[in-house]
Image (cartoon, coloured by chain):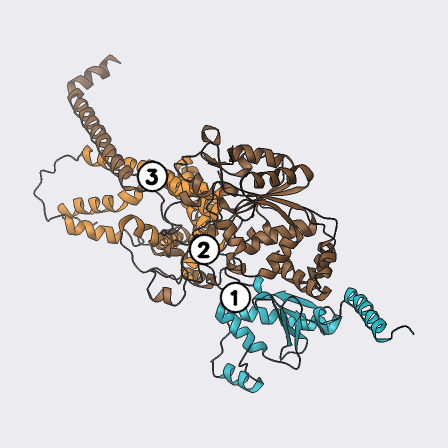
Amino acid sequence: MPDEQTLEERLRQQGISRRGFLKFCTAMASLMALPPTMATAIAESLGKVRRPSVIWLSFQECTGCTESLTRSHSPTVENLIFDAISLDYHHTLQAAAGTAAEAARETAMKENFGKYLLIVDGSVSTKDNGIYSTIAGTTNLQMLQDVAKGAAAIVAVGTCAAFGGIPHANPNPTGAVAVTDIIKDKPIINVSGCPPIPVVITGVLAHYLTFGGLPELDQYNRPLAFFGDSIHDRCYRRPFYDQGKFAKSFDDEGARNGWCLYELGCKGPTTHNACATAKWNNGVSFPIQSGHPCLGCSEPNFWDAGSFYSALSTTTAPLGVWSGVAIAAGAAAGLAMGAAARHKRTLAKQAHHVVTVEELKKKEEQS
Amino acid sequence: MNELLNNGELMHAIDSGELRPSAQVLALLRELQVMITTLAERGEPNSIDIRSLPLSPSDYETLIQILGNGEVNATINALGLSKIKETRFSGVWWLQHLNSHDEIIAELIEVTPLPDILKTQAPDLINSAEVLQRYLEKLQPPN
Amino acid sequence: MTANEILTWVRGPAMQFALAIFFLGIVIRILEMWLLGRAPDLAVARQNGFVPGLRTVFHRSLPAPGLLRREPLVYLGGYAFHLGFFITLVFFAPHIQLFYGVWGIRWPGLPASLIDFIAVISIAALVALLAHRLVHPVRRYLSNVGDYIAWLVTFLPLLTGYMVAHESVLPYAQMLTLHILSIELLLIVLPFTKLTHSFTLFLSRWYNGAMAGRKGVAS
């Protein structure tokens, strides 16, 4: 539950110095992709924050997003972030279960109505009134609508919550949709990715805590600080793309030399995320650095955008059948038109009338 | 940050072609050059977040080798260690902030006469006076 | 629909459609011409027409005497843009990847910077040719809507392609979408405009040469 103490006061109680806090804020600035000089300003405003209540709802998801966040490798930062909020409901993480857990959610909603932050991971099933995914007998659809009413803002974590994700992929048996398809009257931040980068999740929370509002968003409601550039724009292999040096297979000279993975199907040019700079596993690497093309997992419907392994310049559907049918149809039509033209010529020949000199002379005399 | 080249070795590595910085590293070095001049002429400090740069692992190594070691080396122990050193270029500092598991949570280059984090912070100063006062009270029992 | 979904659509169903129209149109046009037939030549052939036909294909590709001096812009510009269009189409690595995806064969590409240079020359040549067409009173008089449509649908793929490579004006996904759409427009329009010459040019040259050859005339 939220309390009246500020973050700074609580940290001081734990024996954390201002210098330590400043260092934490430097890491925060780096997280939020703000210039390092902002660290002092962040310390000023974050220090005054009182713990807001947070309710985390998990719908049609694989727990990968929660794993991503809780297994992130900078415990100090995440712990401090969780120190700065009061996570009142997260049914995967909380000790209480069943009725007790749902009661905790009800209490948090009542006490902080209009003020709590709602985090959602997973898509929402809508087909047949959403009966394909329920928690404690309540459909995800119903729960989202109920909890969203009192939320100050909603963070949709992961591509499923942000865009429908894998459950939404063709043929979408459960009628899965994104949070934005259901909730229209609340500020919503989409933190997409499958899973999203942990520092991006915490960065967004830090921003919300520090500035008390939403960061600047792109057209898909994603924070521009992390989703402003394409993977391609920030990729360290970009110079090879510019030079036209491409890996042609996963084990050729180009692959060993770390050349561009465009021809192996890299979706970096059409994907916006922070992987190329924030990286994964505490900055160890990211897919392209490990030699695998980007799948484009932070983009809407990445699952239905053609093969992961064919280049962006190739086609996403087979051309053979249509082309074959078109050629056959063209041949038939061509034959018919050719025959018609020949027939016309024959008729013209038949209609040809030989004119004699006498006939012409007669005509002349008449006129 | 181990086994860094000294000035002579760096010169040799550059002359022999052993050390060939990429375009990204060269751009960063030029930016640092501008920042140093700005600091010298106008007293304006600057900083670069290493993590915001698209550096390959070898770019990172090259950058560390070129910046090298300078005169100052400091360690801060607050919420995990922070390793701070002045590079071979005076006024250019390399800062690594680690968490309690010794993992890097932030890494920066600062161009400044002295990084702020090394200075004692005002709230800590007030706290320090209070703590010392408490010690004094213990040391000088009222008679 | 999001930008990437539109891109997926133009790479898939839209391409299927455009290519189908292209094949349909081009097969109709060629069959129509072929089936029309020619009056039988009853004279004894002086020689077989095949080789003279090939010779004409080559000869007519060289400037006629005095033509280069009289119309250097049209001649050189025309060649520059045709060759440039062909080279960028066939030797740009992402395009090779496209052909590889369809036919399963690939060939070495040219460096991106060279392709870039060639694309700029082609674009400049096309712009110069259009300006010439508009400025020259006789050319302007002879031009009709079909000529301008043909110019536009040829120009757009080059321009948008260059813009994709440089990520100018629009982000990559949107620009690539426009580029592919421009190709699809070209495919659809090609069989029904004078752009059909990409198929009939060498056929008709060969035919003229072969007929002349049969009669023992140099062409």
Q: Chain of mark 1?
A: B
Circles 2 and 3: CB distance less than 8 Å? no
Q: Are marks 2 and 1 on the same chain?
A: no
Between A306 and C50, the one lying in front of the other is A306
Q: Nearer the viewer, mark 2 or mark 3?
A: 3
Identify the residue under disc 2.
C120
Q: Amino acid at mark 3?
A: Gln
Q: Alpha-carbon neighbours of circle 1 within 10 Å: few (<14), some, or many (≥20)? A: many
Which residue extends farthest front? B143
Identify the residue under disc 3.
C16
Chain identifier for the orange-coloured part of the image: C
Chain identifier for the cyan-coloured part of the image: B
Q: Residue at x 68, y 67 (%)?
A: B46
Q: Position of residue A77 (x, y in %)?
A: 61, 59
Q: Chain of mark 3?
A: C
Q: Nearer the viewer, mark 1 or mark 3?
A: 1
Q: Quadrant of the N terminus of chain B?
A: bottom right
Is residue B20 in sight in this rendering? yes
Residue A29 relative to residue C150: left or right: right
Q: Is residue C171 above or below residue B92?
A: above
Between A329 and A141, the one lying in front of the other is A141
Q: Position of residue B54 (x, y in %)?
A: 53, 63
Marked residue nearer the N-terminal end (2 or 3): 3
Q: How many marks?
A: 3
Chain A: colour as depicted: brown
